[in-house]
Image (tube, coloured by chain):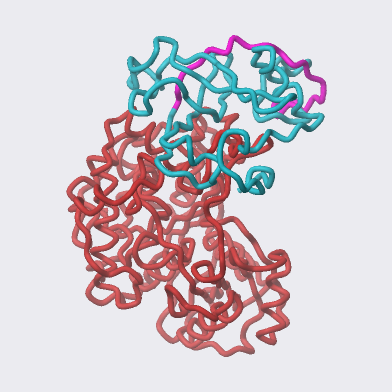
Amino acid sequence: MTTDNAATDTAATGPEFRPAPPATELTEPFWAGGLSGELRLQQCANCGHIRYPISTICPVCWSADCVWTPLSGRGTVQSHIVFERAYHEAWADQVPYVVALIELDEGPVLVSNVVGVQPSAVRVGQPVTVTFARRSATAALPQFTPVDGGGSGDGEAAR
Amino acid sequence: MRGGRPSASTAHRASQETDVEKGNRVAEPVRAAIAGVGASRQGKLPGETDLSLATEALRAALDDSGFAKDDIDGLLTMPGTTTADPAKHYLRLGEHLGINPKIAGSLSAGGATAGMLVQQAALAVSAGMAEVVAVVFGDAARTGGSRFSAPSGAAVSSGNWGMYGNAANSALGARRHMALYGTTSEQLGWVAVNGRRNASLNPNAVMREPITIADHQSSRWIVDPLHLLDCCLISDGGVALIVTSRERAGDARAGAVDILGMGQGHTLQTLERKDWWYLPHQQDCISRAYRQAGLSPADIDVAQLYDNFTISVLFWLEHGGFVKPGESGPFVDGGKRIALDGELPVNTAGGNLSESYMQGWLHVVEGVRQMRGESGPRQVADARTCLVTGRGMTLQTASCLILGASS
């Protein structure tokens, strides 16, 4: 399992101590996009594949040429889990909180949060739209909120 | 499996491209057998180390096999979660044991490693590169300070969204299975109850006190939808296996168990694969082993299915072709079909959930014991074939063995 030490070195509680995403040259456009309300991912300049996770090459054609492309920010909940306890103290004031797999309308799947709704109202297949939580001067975290304010997802229609 | 379930070729279409559909060649049979198995004490063992526990296990396995230390000409190891410099694990263990083998190496693929190393050993003895391969694991995970709650994820860490712990990915799979197929938490609970019921018949199991569905339901959330009793233990212990050629297998003191089929499958991409949550590589892994063995799900008498979490057993039942996609919840409901006298007895020694968390290594040991008819009060009557599965990393890597009783 890949781990990110930036997320484990923090020692205090509360949102300001939640790990600010490390701003590398590779990932900077992803994090900075949120500051202007834009969800961007890399689109391969050779084959057009929109990829995630962020990478130096396209996993389909191996081209290194890509363009950071603005996306609609719309998607559906592929699956979701609820953290009823914090495994890192920086999240202690957040529980219960929802971590979800979000399938974007353009195809890519993101790990993110569903916010602005009771965890019990999140559903597989629920339409969601992006919202951003500012974490630093250079980074905003994409999260998602139900399009209809929550509760009407249809799991059977989701696969 | 008793009762004539659908065969692998018709029961399962979760993966778009199986080997069968692609017409790939079938792996040739290996001429290899497991000649001995052994385990150290299990549980909470302060003061022990990965090396001491691996040594204790290998001593037991060698004694079980009837071979001597000087017969060992292969050493394949899995480092523990507490092992420093894991790539050099086999060097340290070989020096410690005084072994200078023909083949050696260490591999870390989590719960898939035991199966993968047995496969590597089987290929080596089948090709004549070695004759008696010691396959060894030891770890002081319980008392040695392992952290299993680290953030999960890739290039951009999922920790940024507060996703922590090994349970999280399996919980995402469980939730989606529930949403698509109506699978319930109580059905997951029957996997835990079954494992504990079998562990109560296993004097070496760490957790032997029977549990109920009510116990499962009232146990605390690890991450909703997985309760504490959906999760494996964390244990200190070691396990060792002796793999040898069919030619040398006749020398095995307790009788050798044939390796009939072997398979692997890997979905090394995760988020790029929309069906990653369903672990489609597991179906390919098992179908490869079925084809090598010339067997189908209906031919499997008993199964040791990797159970880091209860949901994993449901996936394996579907991927092994024992039920159709989505039907594993009803299959385990009530616990009768997976019980020792059921259609497909599952995790007869208690598994990772109740016997001990040896990352699937004890699943191989119990498979061998079932094939030798040595499992005592938990022995499955007339068991001649056993499917053993393992899976590790971020759910990406699967391996399996089909074991057969010697005729």
In this rendering, position of residue B325 left or right of residue B338: right
Q: Is residue A27 visible?
A: yes
Residue A157 percent location from the top left of the image: 36, 17
- Residue shown at 55% from the left, 44% from the top: B396
Between residue B379 and residue B232, name the one nearer to us.
B232
Q: Position of residue B225 (x, y in %)?
A: 35, 40
Q: Residue at x 27, y 62 (%)?
A: B196
Q: Which chain is cyan?
A: A
Q: Quadrant of residue B234?
A: bottom left
* Chain B colour in the picture: red
In this rendering, the answer to whether B305 lies above or below A73 is below
Count of residue discs: 0
Left or right side of B92 for B42: left
Residue B37 is at least partly visible in this image: no
Q: Is residue A67 magenta?
A: yes
Q: What residue is drawn where x is 26% and y is 38%?
A: B184
Q: Is residue A74 above or below residue B255?
A: above
Give whichever of A18, B208 is nearer the camera: A18
Q: Position of residue A57 (x, y in %)?
A: 77, 29
Q: Quadrant of the C terminus of chain B?
A: bottom left
Identify the residue at image location x=29%, y=68%.
B199
Q: Which residues are magenta?
A: A58-78
Residue A155 in the figure: left or right of residue A104: left
Q: Is residue B314 magenta?
A: no
Q: Position of residue B85 (x, y in %)?
A: 72, 66
